[in-house]
Amino acid sequence: MHRHEHVPVRVVSGVFGAGKTSALISWAQNRDDAAGYLVWVALDTDVRARDSFWLLFLHHLEALSVPVDADLTIALLDQETHGPRLPALLARQLERSGVLTLVVDAGAEYIDDGVARDIVRLVDLCPELRVVIATRQGATDRESVARLGDRLALVDPVLLAFSPAEARQLAGAEGITLDAQRAKQIIDATGGWAAAVHAAIRSASRDDDWVAGLAERLLDEVRTHPGYGALRVLGLADSIAPHDVMELGLGDVADDIVNELVLRGVATRDERKVALQPIIRFALQTEFEAQAPQEFKEAHRQWARHRLRHDVARAAYAHAVASEDWPLAARAYRRYLLAITERERRPATRPIPSAALRAQPILRFAVALDDLSNGRRARALQGFAAMLAVAQGRQLAHRTATIDDIWIRTLVMVSLRLLGQHEMARSALRGLTRMAHSIDDRDEEIVEGRSKLLTQGATTLILSGHLTEASDHLEEAGLTPLIGRPPLERARVLSMIAMVDALRGDIRTASAALAECDALSLPTGLGDSYTGLPAMVAGALVALERGDWATADAFLRRTDTHAPTTEFWAVLLQAGTMLEWHRQGAPAALGYLEQGMEQHVHRGTQSPFATHTLHVLRITLLIAVGRFVEAKEALAGVPQRRSRRWTLMKAYSELFSGDPNRANALAVSSLRQADTPRERIALLVIAAAASHRVGDTTMSARYAASASAEARKFQLWQVLTLIPKPEAAILFAGESDVLDAIRHSRTFPLAAASLGVLSARELVVLRQLIDDATIEQIAKDLSVSRNTVKSQLRAVYRKLGVNNRAEAVSEARRLHLL
């Protein structure tokens, strides 16, 4: 703890009974007297809500003779009226208190959203406040305090474990002498678990060999107890709540033997849970499986069903696999897929036999996904392929679809996607949609899984490059069927809607979906979980469109923990590149993008979405830095370059490095086929710029007006900066909102100041110089006199600051005029 004194919030995490409270007490007793007041709030069932928590805090302050603000007490008693003022009032109270440390014990179990948000806010407002939270290991990922970033220190759980030196020191305090070897034996046997170390030290004086066989000795002493059979069943779980004992029918005998183990120091108990010391739990399980294998499996089956009834699907799956009840395991895994809200470690289980994998495609998927998440990619891909074969065989054998078939078809779709077969995954989605409409869902399992099915379907369509189809998929299903379901399910769909619309360029709709999602009452920390990733992406894209670079950066930072595993890595790289473009300019952004693309080569087959998104951005950046030849080469090398989806980039490339007439023809011919608002506006901008460059001011104005109208409709502005700002200023002259949006953009930061003073006719003459046309040829083509052409050429040279044709062409290319 002392090594983190400079950090305002410290979280001490560890397993149940690891000694967190003892460590905090020891730290508190050894604090420097000059460190100010210390307030200790131990949470329990009576102190869990915002009002009761802070009222107890104020009570402790009064006990320390600190005057308490009366307005603060009133606000706590009437939060409906004064609740929004509470953080400010608390901050004012803490200013009066001076340096203060708040210790929150058992924080993972009972600290609610309001208290967590208050703590985050107070740390911002009160520089002299220090907060220490004791929590179960891993629980901090779900707490609001995790948003504090570098102001949060996580005290490694290993620091709570006793060392051999500390064991000898503890023994000396109790009048027992331990040599170094015996102390090491104790730590090895107990894992440094606080309660067990105490028990082992006390018992070590009785028998020199006792520590070496700690678990066996403990079992010997309790094997004759009437509750030993119940203990073996209970020992299959990491922790046991009172209702577990009752519902499993283990009765008072279980309570008796657990009490005995608590007295021996190898179990820890409070009003909520009992936890056996890990070494004795492992010994119990090993003995149980060896002596009574069938009873062992049946006990696991009991636990699996019990955990399913209480929606603890992850533990249910592990127990079901241990029981070798494969249909139950498949059912538990389905429940696990419904319950999971973030990309977390997969349930740990023992190996599943091949026969079970062949009979249960869902388990085949579970094993393959576990391989993929642990870096065994080749083995994972083999597993997904095997799952497809099993699923196809099952489909041929059964004519009537069941709930199992819905889930299998869903996992087939996901497997195909992970294998890189995106169009096949899209076809599987169509079949899944038809099947879902016809299934008899008596237990409403499809209703419960609807949000997952919707978002997985949308993910498949996004990655296959069909953004509008993804939007239609979500819109047709809608949120209406989710009315009455938990807010989490609505949030899952709303965040996906927001991301799809942001990718399409419908920023207005994306913003509305984000606002609706924010208005829901959601679990603390969900916004930073894997479920909240689409909303984070959407938030970044919306902020980029508005030129709010700081907010975009904040959203992207929140995605860092998910970036290595998400299928949406390409859009994160795209958004990060746009941010780098703003910060450092186009050359730096191009380097950032190319480095990111290189790092993701190991992902194997890239999705059509990733390929198109990143190649479009790279070509755009090559043009922005004036590397036109490389841009054309990059465009020539893209996959399926004859596809319509590349027409936009072909028109764009021609606009800057080729013939503006051809750019105009390509853009105009593709307008009717434009699939998204972003694509349509981009084509209109290119058509407007190309028409202007060939002197057709009427059509240029018409296309520019359409582009600005569409941009207002969808609140999409960045796409208007496809052309240099001076040229955009001419095209959108008089449209203050458009010009303001362009002014705040850092795209195309090249010095093209001369463009604004070249007339349309001078631009036409300038472009005639590319083919080395003589003055006579230019005059004939433009139907003007030789003297007029000479006069216009002199004006071009003067405005560009050059002396001859060659210099004029070179400077014009640098300024993106050709």
Image: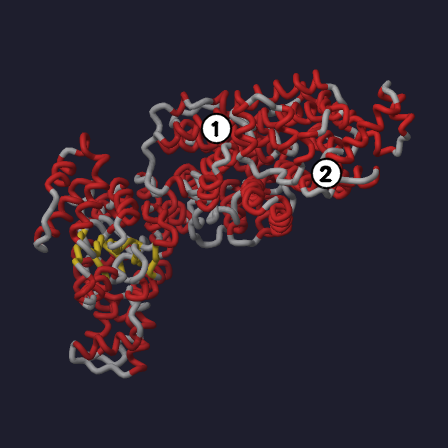
State the residue at coordinates (39%, 27%). Answer: 516
Q: Residue drawn at (42%, 49%), measured in percent from left and top?
A: 347
Numbered disc 2: secondary structure: loop
Q: Position of residue 704 (x, y in %)?
A: 64, 21
Q: Residue at x 26, y 50 (%)?
A: 126
On the picture, is 464 further left or further right than 59?
right
In the image, taking residue 428 as reference, residue 642 lies left or right, namely right
Spatial separation of the CA atoms under disc 1 and disc 2:
30 Å
Which of the marked residues, 1 or 2, is nearer the chain's N terminus?
A: 1
Can residue 408 be seen from the camera position used here? no
- The percent position of residue 477, horizontal first and vertical second, equals 48, 22
| Foreground label between 1 and 2 | 1
Is residue 249 at least partly visible in the picture? yes
Look at mark 2 in the image and give the residue it sits on: 639
Q: Position of residue 514 (x, y in %)?
A: 42, 30
Question: Is 732 on the left or on the right of 275, as rendered?
Answer: right
In the depicted structure, whether residue 111 falls above or below residue 730: below
Report which quarter residue 307 is drawn in: top left
Which residue is label 1 attached to?
510
For the N terminus, the quadrant is: bottom left
- In the image, 595 versus 318, the foreground residue is 595
Q: Residues within 10 Å of mark 2 (few under 14, many from 20)?
A: few
Q: Residues within 10 Å of mark 1 (few under 14, many from 20)?
A: many
